Amino acid sequence: MTSVLVVDDEPQIVRALRINLSARGYDVMTAYDGKSALGVAVEGKPDVVVLDLGLPDIDGVDVIAGLRGWSTIPIIVLSARTDSSAKVEALDAGADDYVTKPFGMDELLARLRAAVRRNVAREAGDPVVETASFVVDLAAKKVRRDGHEVHLTPTEWGLVEILARNPGRLVSQKQLLQEVWGPMHVNESQYLRVYFAQLRRKLEDDPAHPRHLITEPGMGYRFEV
Amino acid sequence: MTSVLVVDDEPQIVRALRINLSARGYDVMTAYDGKSALGVAVEGKPDVVVLDLGLPDIDGVDVIAGLRGWSTIPIIVLSARTDSSAKVEALDAGADDYVTKPFGMDELLARLRAAVRRNVAREAGDPVVETASFVVDLAAKKVRRDGHEVHLTPTEWGLVEILARNPGRLVSQKQLLQEVWGPMHVNESQYLRVYFAQLRRKLEDDPAHPRHLITEPGMGYRFEV
DNA sequence: TCCGGCCTTTACGCGTTCTTGAGGCCGGGG
DNA sequence: CCCCGGCCTCAAGAACGCGTAAAGGCCGGA
């Protein structure tokens, strides 16, 4: 089901959207200010965001920036401002569309369909990366091998996830350390050796001669499919 | 350069768009009816289409359908009709955005940027530099030769990367030494000789007569594609 | 409290990579 | 003609990074 996050401080608008969207089979989340909107977006990973610009706490453009920092979810902006400078600002901040209030529900729904359609086309690839000896399911956070699930610790999964999201590409030691252990540990390359040894024992057919979790000495690691 | 196909039967609108878009560095193609628009789109493969709905020959929705038959190029619709049924129809036919005439040039340009930005993010293909004998994949940090991967050490890769990012251009010894070995070693030109010899052994068909990793005596090195 | 899983840390052997020096080649200038 | 600077080649020791094993610490659940 497609999920929509509706962000607006006017309850009647949120209510109208909730009713219309639910009736058309969307899964609706709501937020009434920018702060909670960002929180809900992180939690719920909506497929599209409908965002009012006039929020009580954070400026709308900053909300857009906050979302764009980690995600490419389509954002449709709602606003009472009709001047083009506002539109330009929002669109250049990363919004995908701009609808002025008052708006026609039909039109908003059509624009929402267009935004979702584009994104579905983009993300057509399943969140599953497959190799000769094991399968990484990024959505379910699971790894299977010979049809049998392999248990990974949180740290192990962190490494596998980053590599699986960049199949074939070299990922630097620094990037791995930074994203898994945090910026304070970017020099602890020994961690990587220990954990890659563990991962190879769990995932590779011949841990001494890995075919998928490849070390590029002095540079980083590579996930070969 | 980003290319835009402008389709409108009103010459003054086409002219205004051509001027504005060209001034901003876009490559502009034009068409005055649906039939030629489809032809130009097939020929020129624009990055985005600005389409007027009121064309003399074909209905705008059918033009959208004609484009969507073979392509996912972003389509921004221009129209004088403000009723929501027209918008819904166009968007559901596959348009990405809908702007009503008269329109603000700033806004149209912002929407155009948004449409292009989305599409670029989607098609973010790896930057690849190719020569007759080998291929350098800058994103994956890989070098292939005869379809077979060549292993480079970090220092070797550092040199190849700088040269590949400046194809055809002369890179001074000082710059290479500074970026790979650091500012303390800008005079160790012997390092370069040793490493270029290694690289040529690995990459050139005839290492004694290099065709891509060229020495410019007394000056630096050049990557010839 | 004990136990087990997970993370961190240390130590060591080994292969690869980097650095360094020596020698030869080539072309231009004295 | 010879000299010389810049380049290429080769080789060997030093330095570095990696894989592996194993031990200790932390923490939450039984």
Image (cartoon, coloured by chain):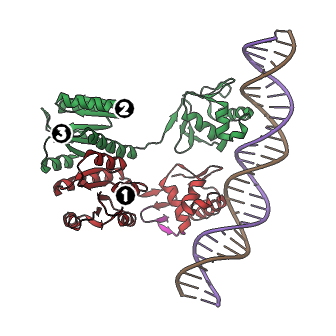
Chain colours: A red, B green, C purple, D brown
Callout 1, which amino acid?
Val
Q: Residue beneath label 1, please?
A: A63
Q: Which mark is residue B70?
A: none
The answer to whether one can see residue A94 in this image is yes
- B89, A84: nearer the viewer: A84
Whole-percent x, y for residue B209 in the image: 65, 24
- Using the rendered view, name the quadrant where residue D10 is placed: top right
Callout 2, which amino acid?
Gly
Q: Chain of mark 3?
A: B
Q: Residue at x 55, y 27 (%)?
A: B168
Assign a secondary structure to mark 1: helix
Say left or right for B189 vs B86: right
Tell me which label, 3 or 2, sits earlier in the chain. Answer: 2
- A133, A31: nearer the viewer: A31
Whole-percent x, y for residue A162 in the image: 51, 57
The answer to whether one can see residue B72 in this image is no
Tell me, yes or no, whether the two marked residues, 1 and 2, touch with CB atoms within 8 Å: no
Q: Residue beneath label 2, please?
A: B25
| Magenta span of residues | A138-153
Q: Is residue A147 above or below residue B125?
A: below
Callout 3, which amino acid?
Pro
Q: Is residue D5 above or below residue B158?
A: above
Give neighbour class at mark 2: few <14, some 14-19, many 20+ (Cα, 10 Å): few
- A109, B137: nearer the viewer: A109
* Mark whose residue sits in front, 3 or 2: 3
